[in-house]
Image (tube, grey):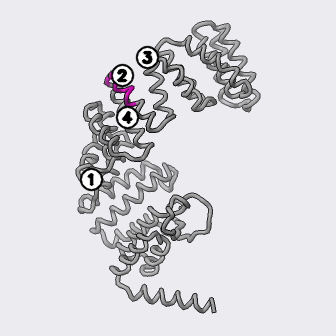
């Protein structure tokens, strides 16, 4: 009885779909999307247009696949799921489970349709959107590299603009692609147009500020960075906007406003590496009592990572406070006595500092670092070449 009932339901469903017009099918699919029945919506569209021959059906399928996938394989195969009212797609994204899998090579499907409908600018927009999403998700590790993707995004989005199918995101993505290629002047008009079309999209303001900053137009950079800070609601992005304001003021040699915005960034999104680094530099420069506490916080973000030590060197050497850094490192040995990676780094970087102060002592630190790192790294690890270079310099 169960099998007969199932077959009957499927037959009724199929007959119902084929009895609908394209408009009715799209309306029904959108209704399913609105109640989070993403897989059902995709299946409905698939059944109505199994050969992907109808542009509007294909574009709605693309929207579902790109925005509501649970997981994907190179954005050519998508896992989809119907959700309950109180569920969110991010509750499942990237997690294991049993989901419906659907092959849908968006780029190939849209390319085929463009050959049939070359004047349909919505297809170009869909293709531009797809390549942008692929870039964001796979970061240069897709079937095409980023340079080729950027070219395809630019070509298709410009055709969407020519055909009057562009929206604020079309212009934003073009601006983004130019900034990503360090073509900041070319990016500016596209971000301005994106803002003209949508005054509430924070990322257009943020990236416009970034483009202006990279063309040394700091007044405009300040203007748009402030607006992005006002608009962002996401903590991470809002913290980035405040940090950009700090950076702009710092470049303008306005340490007071720079510090105010870096502190605001730290308040919004505490413990960010770049914010803490900037705060340490400003506190140290002004002689603030907060420098010591911030130095500890910065070091403890990643005490085994050489980048921390390199950045500390940069800050303290520039302000000629190497002795403070030496005292700080020496004070850490007891706290990290059981961590060979940290104590190895402490010895290695003390050796580097002493190269210009006391070469004999520098050599002693390098030799200690070599013995300690031998416990944790293979003989061919790059750190040993750096140590040998340090020992060689200490003997000259």
Quarter of the image for the C terminus: give it: top right
Label 3 element class: helix
Mark 3 or 1 closer to N-term?
A: 1
Task: Indicate which disc residue 285 carries.
Answer: 3
Verify CB contact (< 8 Å) between mark 2 and mark 3: yes
Mark 4 or 1 closer to N-term?
A: 1
Verify CB contact (< 8 Å) between mark 1 and mark 2: no
User: Is residue 97 placed above or below 268 in the rendered structure?
Assistant: below
Mark 1 or 2 closer to N-term?
A: 1
Mark 4 or 2 closer to N-term?
A: 4
* Mark 2: few/some/many CA within 10 Å (<14, 14-19, 20+): some
Q: Is residue 260 magenta?
A: yes
Mark 2 or 3 closer to N-term?
A: 2
Task: Indicate which disc residue 255 carries.
Answer: 2
Image location of residue 341, percent across then percent down: 69, 28
What is the distance, in whole Å, between disc 4 and disc 2 at their CAs?
Answer: 14 Å
Verify CB contact (< 8 Å) between mark 4 and mark 1: no
From the viewer's perspective, tell me whether residue 180 is left or right of residue 299.
left
What is the distance, in whole Å, between disc 3 and disc 4 at their CAs?
Answer: 19 Å
What is the distance, in whole Å, between disc 1 and disc 2 at their CAs?
Answer: 33 Å
- The segment highlighted magenta reads 252-261
């Amino acid at each position: 009885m169960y099998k007969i009932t199932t077959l009957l339901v499927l037959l009724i469903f199929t007959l119902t779909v084929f009895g609908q017009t394209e408009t009715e099918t799209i309306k029904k699919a959108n209704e399913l999307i609105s109640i989070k029945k993403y897989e059902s919506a995709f299946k409905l569209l698939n059944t109505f247009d199994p050969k992907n021959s109808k542009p509007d059906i294909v574009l709605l399928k693309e929207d579902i696949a790109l925005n509501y996938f649970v997981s994907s394989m190179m954005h050519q195969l998508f896992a989809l799921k119907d959700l309950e009212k109180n569920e969110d797609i991010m509750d499942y994204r990237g997690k294991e489970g049993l989901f419906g899998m659907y092959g849908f090579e968006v780029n190939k499907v849209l390319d085929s349709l463009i050959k049939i409908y070359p004047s349909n600018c919505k297809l170009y927009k869909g293709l531009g959107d797809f390549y942008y999403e692929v870039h964001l998700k796979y970061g240069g590790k897709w079937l095409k590299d980023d340079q080729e993707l950027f070219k395809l995004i630019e070509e298709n989005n410009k055709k969407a603009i020519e055909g009057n199918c562009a929206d604020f995101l079309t212009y934003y993505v073009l601006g983004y692609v130019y900034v990503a290629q360090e073509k900041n002047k070319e990016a500016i008009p596209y971000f301005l147009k994106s803002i003209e079309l949508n005054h509430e999209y924070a990322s257009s303001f943020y990236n416009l500020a970034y483009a202006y900053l990279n063309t040394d137009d700091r007044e405009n950079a300040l203007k748009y960075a402030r607006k992005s800070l006002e608009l962002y609601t996401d903590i991470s992005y809002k913290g980035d906007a405040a940090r950009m304001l700090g950076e702009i003021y710092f470049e303008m040699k306005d340490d007071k406003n720079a510090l105010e915005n870096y502190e605001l960034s730290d308040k919004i999104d505490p413990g960010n590496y770049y914010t803490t680094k900037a705060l340490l530099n400003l506190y140290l420069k002004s002689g603030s009592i907060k420098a010591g506490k911030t130095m500890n916080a910065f070091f403890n973000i990643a005490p085994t990572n050489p980048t921390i030590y390199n950045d500390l060197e940069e800050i303290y050497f520039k302000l000629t406070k190497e002795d403070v850094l030496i005292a700080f490192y020496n004070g850490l040995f007891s706290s990290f006595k059981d961590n060979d990676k940290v104590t190895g780094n402490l010895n290695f970087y003390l050796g580097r500092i002493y190269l210009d102060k006391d070469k004999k002592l520098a050599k002693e630190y390098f030799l200690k670092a070599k013995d300690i790192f031998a416990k944790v790294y293979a003989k061919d690890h790059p750190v040993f070449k750096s140590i040998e270079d340090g020992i060689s310099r200490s003997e000259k």
